Amino acid sequence: MAGISPSETERLVTHAAAPGIAAAGRILSADLPTSGTQRIIQDFDPTRDKLDLGANSVHAFIVVDTPEGVAFRDPWSGREVLIAGISLGQLTVDSFVPVENDHLRQDLSGALAWEHGIQAAPHTVYARSHEIGQIDRVAFDPQTDTIYGTREQIFMVDSAEGVVIGNYTTGQALILLNAKVAELSIDNFVFHNAQAKEDCLWLQLGFTAIPESQIRSRADIPTAGTNAWPTEAGPGDPPSGEAGTTFLIDWDHSSHVVLDFDPATDRLDFNYFRPNGFTVAEAGGSVVIAIVGQNQSYTLDGVALAELDYNNIVAVEDATYQTWLALIDEARNDAPQAAIPVLSVADAQVTEGQSGAGMLMFTVSLSAAAAGVVTVDYATLNGTAQAGSDYQAALGTLTFQPGETSKMVHVAINGDTTFESDETFQLVLSSPAGAALGDGSAAGTIRNDDATPAGRPLIRVGDVTVAEGDDGEPHMMFPITLSFASDTPVSVRYLTRDDAAKAGSDYEAMSGTVTFAPGQTVAHVHVPLIGNRTVEADERFYLLLGHANGGTIVDGIGQGFITNDDAVTPPPSGSGDEVIFTVTDDWTSGFTGAMTLMPEDTLNGWTVEFDAPFAIGNIWNAEIVSHVGDHYVVRNASWNGKVAADGAVTFGFQAAPGGASTAATGFIVNGVSTGEPKPEPELPMLAVADTQVSEGDSGMAHLTFTVSLSEASTSAVTVRYATANASATAGSDYSPLSGSLTFAPGEFTKTIHVMVNGDTLVEANETLALTLSDATGATIADARATGTIRNDDVAAPVPKPVVSVSNVSVTEGDPGTGSAADGWFSTSGNQIVDSAGNPVKIAGVNWFGFESTNASPHGVWTRGYQDMMDQMKDLGFNTVRLPFSTDTLHASSAAGIDYGQNPEFQGLTPLQIMDKVVEYAGDIGLKVILDHHRSGFGAGASENGLWYDSAHPESQWIADWQMLAERYADDPTVIGADLHNEPHAGTWGGGGANDWAAAAERAGNAIGAVNDNWLIFVEGVGSYQGENYWWGGNLMGVRDRPIELDVPNKLVYSPHDYGNSVYAQPWFQGSDFAADLPAKFDEMWGYIYREGIAPVYIGEFGTRLQDPKDAPWLEALTSYMSGDFDNDGALDIPADEEGMSWTYWSWNPNSTDTGGILKDDWRTVHTDKLAYLEPIQFDFDDGVSTDATYAVFMVALSEASTEAVTVGFHTMAGSADASDFTAVSGTLTFQPGETSKLIRVPVTPETQGEPDEQFTLMLTDADGAVIGVAEGVATIVDDDKAVPIMPSLSIADARVEEGHAGQSGQLAFTVTLSAPATETVTVGYRTVDGTAVAGQDYTPTTGSLTIAAGQTTATIHVPIIGENAVETDERLTVVLTNAVGATLGDAQAIGTLVNDDAAVPPPSGGGDELVYTVTDDWTSGFTGAMTLNADDALNGWVVEFEAPFDITNIWNAEIVSHVGDHYVIRNASWNGKVAADGQVSFGFQASPGGASTTASDFVVNGEPVGGSEPLARMVALAEPADDEASLESGAGLLFDDVLTPMLSDVTTSEDGFNVEVTIHNDGDAAKGWTVEIGTPFEITEVSNAEIIARTEDGYIIGGIGESSAVGGKDDITFEIAGHGVFTASQFDLLI
């Protein structure tokens, strides 16, 4: 096997991509090898590269996953191309360029869909194929459902389970449960075009005709193959890499081959061998395969027959494959069996009969009676007897009850009067449970009882037509048939004979004898063909029959037609560009074609023109410029415009009609007819420019298109033009126009005027196209221009609704007091309480799947169960409700599990898997509620609406609950039993078998008898006294007939509730239905909680939030559950009680009605759903319910809008600040028809007595409405008793000289009480870095300070570290915390380390250096870096420069200001200190790039780079003030820590605020300062200063005039005014 290097197949190389855009990879040819059997493509990258499958057909290009990688294989010749190391599942639709062959495109798309786990659409069953022995059972409703996708050689019959659609060769079947063939029509099936028109599957299914409505056209076939580059690989796993060898069994006279055969990986390929062509025996521990009549054998050395598996055999003939299955099963059945009952099936036979249906009965036996239930699947497989014609296919499951040892399988036999040999088929057993499989297959013999027809059978040979092919070994299979089966062998000799096709050059001469065994009526003669690439006429040869023995030849001449499939060889170089057109497939009503352009010279863009009668419906690798009449103009795609001299580029298309209409003529390439030499000199280029015009209200406007020549021509130039619709329509929007332009010699430009129709209609801008074609004397460079008709009409203004927010009042409440106590839950009144009696709330999620046929929680096929449960916990859920079925508890195995991600589930029963889920829930603190969801496996409630059925009696239901209660009796993780899901057909009271209330008591008391710790959850019914409600949600009967249990304080009622999207219930249909919902809840189940009868737990509620009525319902429901019974935003329950418990439906995204918390990827969360649940969650660990205190603002529209309305909102502090509530902000969206929304703001509970406090919710930026009342005030009503007034603590600033290296000193901070305390006061303290750094400038200090009763002061000492570096004064902060016996007043103090070191003058000519580098430049933007090389040590640095670019992102520094082209940039918090001769770097991203990347006039800390004179700059720099002569000229650097800003005077009202800001200069006089103010408020006016810049976080303000100078130890003051109620916490001041 030879590998293939990328250079052999690459047709496009990688090119640079813009930032953020995936780079192009390679396009690799997937053509089959021209020699040998395999080509290998190495290093294929599924995240970047693409495959080109060319014009290959599906019949010779089958996709198959192998251990080495995915391969595309010709099953006839065995040739394949292998994508090494990549599986099919790692490919995506973007891994292929558009696939030309529609049948291949169909199969490849389906294969990718299966690999990626695509789920079927509603009411659709996808029938899969090519999976030996796979049997799928599906629910099917003939009234609504359809079947999509299947393969050839199928049959459809009735069986005991339902309709069976099976495949003859693989034993694969699809069973439509409980359906009958008579109930099905052609409307239940959907076919692809090839399945209907080529394979005629509808005939194989027994239908006589098929309407076009059931055929998906070629255009509807999903496209595997796109023009987009891949950006990620598919989700599949890489191939295993464990490959074996396939040994071909072939005719080779007198050869005896010994094979080194490994049954684990190797295969035997029997190709066209039939069972009568070989024998199999076992000798000396080796399998020996003898070829009949050839003195030939193959020996599998050391391999016994029982070691082989079905996967070791490959065969074209189904009978050969079935023979091997029987041999392997027989050998395995002889192996020793374990001492458990053994299943076997005995051979059977029956006489065929003349008509009607007989019955063949197979006996299936157990070697001994089993103690438990034994099940085994069975299915029939074809032999010489065929399902449908000779017998009716049967498949199903047998069940042996304990003690039973024998069962019968009945197979219907079709009688006839045709003579034939005895025929056989097999009954195969599989998937045993409770017993071992012994003799797993039996032969069923249908004995012929018809007389042999008089005379000898007639022998005929058929004609065959095959395309020649380019190379390899195409073949012909001539069919030879008998008119009827003979009871003795029939033979006939054959030989080939030349006609136009010649043996040796066109085909291989063949001769021999065909022998028909008794009963056989069809045989084939295989004639290999010899492919070539020569263009020639179709050719013919003959297959002649003679010398018949036992039959009479009536048609002894078979014609073999070899059709030519080669294209004309391109003419030699020098004759101009050429276009070769090939019809690749033709089905009369349409065809696919390909055109290959071979240019004489290099092309940088190409246009192909031609005349053709067909209409192109789809095109790939090119674009249609225009199609006028029969004339096409086609140009290159964006990626294939460049073609090398003598190179080639190909594009393909699908068109209609086919047949005689497939011709194309008059080819023109870039304006020059093909075959003509290129004219000299080069012709000028034509181009047409885009244009636009305003539409006008009436009359006519003109779009004026300018057509220009690249240079003047010495002869006349003509070009045709025509308009074409885009979004503008000819006739209504403009007048269509076509014609030609003529440029006289020397002319450069011409104009074309298209008349535009004016109107007064408000509409979008519209476009039309003008296309150039058929140029003479010039070539067309830009053939298409767009004309834009600009709309100039304005819609009449529509009055907008008014949006307003209301005030709200809320009681503050108290915080939670601790975690839920260990142990079991009970009830007290309407509360669920822990073992200590504290109220708790179940706040969980439903995780379904155990009740389904998988018998395992859903999603474990794609994620680990522990990973999902961790996510549940992280999202705030405290409980998981696990639905299960009765059958789940008794099943022996589960499905739908990725054991790689869930190894703990390997080999476990469903009940043991449930143990694992419960165990891990306990490990992470989740509780579990077990829910009997239904009796049998399936989805939703039990079909009969009851807790029992004929196969699952009530006694079993109760016994199962007792089993579970005992199983988990010692594990408080499982807190209770939801007795049965939605018993909607039950009655509430009244007695009888369907009395749900009585049944719930029987089950609940039975559970309590074995486990008195569990809560018992009882759901409602569907109807009570004529009042209907949701299934499980009607609990009206509780008032009249309450549930009574033997164990007290364990009963919880559990209704279900859903929104309008699940079913449009009548209570959702009113215009103000949301306001009526609390009363509906109260009527059906809410009264139980509200009146204190018992706790209520909403076991299921959920929505996709797509129906606009669902959001108001969910808001009303969650408010009601929290205890807000009238949905007015205030709780109606005591502060020490919890609202109703709940579990949301569902965790799973695959819930049809509601979707899930998770999105379809089983990982991403629907945050819009969580937003409703988070306020009502409860943390068992903290004992805190998140619904305790909320301020709920009502935002309302004055009237409903016909369009969506949005309005922004945010909270603003007032007397209540961040310690009193959690700030919220966002955007509300009112859907059409909605008039109100609620905004919940969490209020922080506390126990400290204080005055009532207020904060504000402000509306902003309304779209679709105008803002009326923009501010809503929330009043937090204090509910705590006043506490005694305690003295307050404060700490004073401190200063100390730094000292020199080796010296030590201390900062002494004095802590003072406002008054003596009567008891000891303690307070914690810690140091915090400022410009002084712990470990460098001082020793970090933490501790606790004690002030004795009666004392008022104490001192905190902070050691400082001396040094000799010249630097500015440095500061640190001491913070007081956790005061006991006093309150904190001024809790922070500044400690100043005064510099006492002298500066060393720099050497003459020295100075700092700054190096600027552009690190990457893509023209529209660039990245750069600046490195500062410090001459002396720096303790903080500022860099200034001039630059024309805009910095959009910066790292390792901060932008102080950007005014005009001037930047001021300072150090980040961690890199301000730079040693002498050291360096520091920062980087940034800016735009534009190119010529704009320059920067100049660099200044570092006030000095030009390389100089010594200080400059005046804003922000952290200053120069000596004019009036301060005492300052030396070189003392120009003023660091941040000498200026201190403070708020000195504040006045505020509802209309706005005025703030006076004072800046104190603690150093020498200086000039030039700025203050950065971080605030969300809008500043409207500044006095004695000016706004220099508006930043993302606020403003930069600097001094003007006299205020820019700050005297030494002096203050300057300026004022600001703005909108809003001022809060000091909303202002951050930074010099």
Image (spheres, helix red, strand yellow):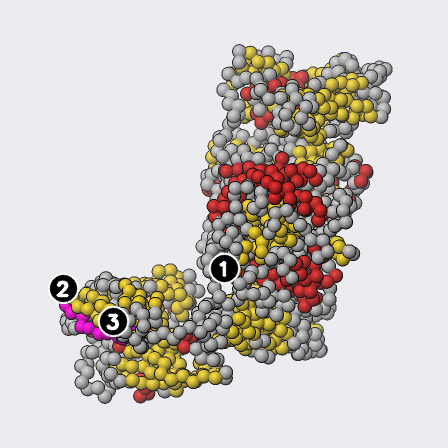
Q: Is disc 1 placed on a helix, strand or loop? A: strand
Ranked by sequence position, the earlier of labels 3 and 2 is 2
Give the total number of marks visible in the rendering.
Answer: 3
Q: Which residue is mark 2?
A: 1302
Of 1541 and 254, nearer the camera is: 1541
Ranked by sequence position, the earlier of labels 1 and 2 is 1
Q: Is-magenta flag for residue 1449? A: no
Q: Residue at point 71% right, 49% down?
A: 997
Q: What distance separates the C-alpha of mark 3 from that of mark 2?
A: 28 Å
Residue 1519 visible within the image:
no
Q: Quadrant of residue 346?
A: top right
Name the amino acid type tagged 1: Val
Residue 162 visible within the image:
yes
Per the rendered image, the range of residues in magenta is: 1289-1300
Q: Which residue is mark 1?
A: 1184
Q: Which residue is mark 3?
A: 1354
Residue 1306 in picture, x, y percent from top left: 19, 69
Q: What distance separates the C-alpha of mark 3 from that of mark 1?
A: 39 Å
Q: Is disc 2 placed on a helix, strand or loop? A: loop
Name the amino acid type tagged 2: Gly
Question: Quarter holding the C terminus?
Answer: bottom left
